[in-house]
Image (cartoon, rainbow, N blue to C red):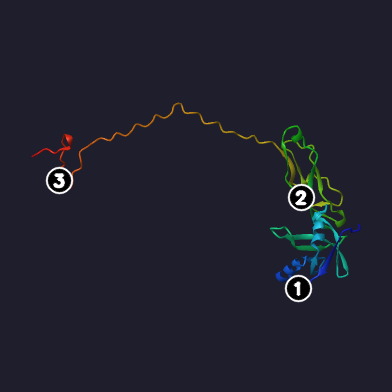
Amino acid sequence: MAIEISLQAELREAAGKGPARRLRRAGKVPATLYGEHKPAVSLAVDPKQLAAILRSESGQNTIFELRMDGEKTAAMVVDWQREPVRGALIHVDLKRIAMDRRLRVRVPVQSQGEAVGVKVQGGILELVTREIELECLPTEIPEHIVVDVSNLSIGQNLRVGDLQLSAGLKTITDPDRVVAHVVAVKEEVVAPAAAPEAAEAAPAEPEVIKKGKAEAKEGEEAVPAEEGGKKKSS
């Protein structure tokens, strides 16, 4: 298979945060290339070319031709980092690829068809596993795995072991792992409204304050008050 996509790279000798920041200000992205039992190499790559590779149909699994210092090698993106606020690429890890050697890749899963459990029974289709890990040759990496969910009824599922894969593809993900299933819609239980009280609570009676004898001062007897507020003469 001829490699149609290429990525231009430049060798860089200086390492560390300072040189990496200066490289980004110059419009480049720091990169590291490793694999195939060769020493790791520090590179600088074009962020626009790299972003185009990651946005392509095959995305991270794209095999491209890496051109650097007069050398050409097949490579792919292994990992990358983005600036948390703007989302700009700030570093990328690349791996040399031997086109005649099997490798492991993670491939996205796409559902196909309308499940019986959704169309007829009113259930909900849930895609539980969105990517699976495969082992294959670089020329055999699929862009995605199609999962036909048409025959799924409520309570049924498809597992990794049920997938029909092309020859040459070996599944690494656990075959018992659920890929998709159809579940019943859960009815929302509405709590009954509180019953109105039979009768409103009777208003509280006002507290009656009774007049009593004045408290005697310490050491003196209490003298009852006369009508009209006068004291009796002795």
Q: Which residue is at 15% across, 40% downward?
A: 223
Query: Which residue type carries mark 3?
Result: Glu
Q: Nearer the viewer, residue 107 or 87?
A: 87
* Label 3 packing within 10 angstroms: few (<14), some (14-19), many (20+): few
Q: Quick check: can you spot residue 158? A: yes
Which of discs 3 and 1 lies nearer the camera? The answer is 3
Left or right of residue 234: residue 179: right
Residue at numbered disc 2: 131
Residue drawn where x is 14% and y is 43% of the image: 221
Q: Dot 2: what SS?
A: strand
In this view of the protein, which residue sits in the foreground, 86 or 136? 86
Q: Amino acid at mark 2?
A: Glu
Closest to the observer, 96 or 225 = 225
Residue sitting nearer the eye, 142 or 215: 215
Q: Earlier in the sequence, mark 3 or mark 1?
A: 1
Q: Give the quadrant of residue 38.
A: bottom right
- Report the residue marked by disc 1: 14
Q: Is residue 10 above or below residue 5?
A: below
Q: Give the mark nearer the N terminus: 1 vs 2.
A: 1
Residue that protrudes farthest toward the left in the picture:
234
Whether residue 104 is visible, yes or no, is no
Cα distance in 3D space between marks 3 and 1: 102 Å
Residue at the disc numbered 3: 220
Mark 3 vs mark 2, CA separation in Å: 97 Å
